[in-house]
Image (cartoon, grey):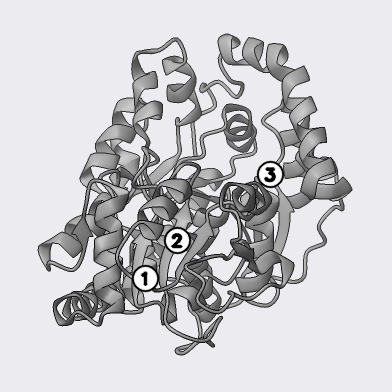
Amino acid sequence: MTGSSEPTVPTPLYRLLVRLLAPVLLGHLLWRALRDGGARYARERLGFGETARPSGAAPRRWVHAASVGEVMTVLPLIETALERGPVEFLVTTNTPTGAAVLARRAPCGVRHRYLPIDWPGATRRFLERERPASGWIVETEIWPWLYARCRRRALPLTIVNARLSRRTTDNVRSPLAATYRRALSGVEVLARSAEDAAAYRTLGAEAARTRIVGELKFAGARAPDSPPAPIEGPYVLAASTHQDEETRLARAWLGGEGEGLLVIVPRHPERGGALARELPGCRRRALGQWPAPGARLYLADTLGELDSWYAHARGVFVGGSLVDRGGHNVLEPARHGRSIVVGPHTANFTAAMAALRAREAIVEVEDAEAVTVFLERTLAADAALAEQGTRAGQVAKEGEDIAARYLARLLAEGESSERSATD
């Protein structure tokens, strides 16, 4: 995997930062454990927990998916790998919400544990307990101590659907630049686009180990063809919304000319209580409440139901795009042939947006008022927007073989790494 002359510890600056921030990280860990993670969360984030027992001759693949979005991205890849032959999968997440979605959606036999904090002892204990044959890291997670421990154990690492945020690429000119270069030494990078591949090379990934495969989100996690309708009657959807988006949308929706129901699905369902206080009279699904007759707003603050909401919505706004969060997965509603509208911030999904734009299968607007106009048109069965949804479904279908392409590349890289480790 890497030469013996390469450093197997992070840079001195990073090691110093880890020591200085240790009390803060430990405090956050305890707060999260008390809030929703529990004792298991605390143990596993410190690298403790049960030692895995091998189940047979099947290789153990470790997949790290930080939270809900990354879990949904990688599930088709896991499903495709399991169809090819016996594989033992361990999936790590950073968050309890990611763990909850994995528990609902993962194929039988996929194990979960929380990724350890990037401390030397925690990462060592994790790898000693699990002993994976390879690691697949989803999208952007670069942890210097974890990567160094893997390098020391000659454990092949591959970043799949690799993408980088503007904030991370800015570190090329920061004091942490050497830390990223050292962490990425020997790591395979399978990027979603040419721009992401170039960004990883700039950050320190080796050119010979960086390849463009495509947007894995095109694959889509498998779901029933016709999931049951979550509520009766027509509605439009604001999905994966963030703070400030909900209040903007609610104000615009209530001030519009229509009379239909807007269902709001916040990206972080734990915000449901706070949102209900901002939206007086808005009933909450997490409390088992149903929309009141004639209601204009409904808060669906639960996990694992977004696919059903998409399947039966008349029109969809995809959140994280009215505020500068880069947007969320526009391919999920496209898969159901929905009419889709987004705000101006969609940098996280450049390839998907480009494909949908090319087929005139998505609408981009600047503010919540324009979102309201779009959604009101979908409730009125606007024929042009219905055709837009049909085109969106065709775009989503065209990329369905992407999981197989990723798996072929991962297996090829794995065989190459195993040969290198034994040379």
The vertical placement of 323 against 262, above or below, is: above
Q: Determine the secondary structure under disc 2.
A: strand
Residue type marked 2: Ala
Image side of residue 19 versus residue 243, left or right: right
Q: Which residue is mark 2?
A: 239
Of pointers 3 and 2, the one earlier in the residue sequence: 3
Q: Which mark is residue 115?
A: 3
Nearest the viewer among 10 and 297 is: 297
Spatial CA distance of label 1 from label 3 is: 30 Å
Residue 230 at least partly seen: yes
Q: Which mark is residue 333?
A: 1
Q: Determine the secondary structure under disc 1.
A: helix
Count residues near mark 1 (Cα–Cα under 10 Å), then give few for <14, some for 14-19, many for 20+. many
Residue 357, located in which quarter of the rendered image?
bottom left
| Residue 265 locus on image (x, y percent) | 52, 61
Spatial CA distance of label 3 from label 2 is: 27 Å
Nearest the viewer among 345 and 397 is: 345
Residue type marked 1: Pro
Of pointers 2 and 1, the one earlier in the residue sequence: 2
| Residue 387 locus on image (x, y percent) | 17, 80
Residue drawn 36% across the image and 43% down it: 163
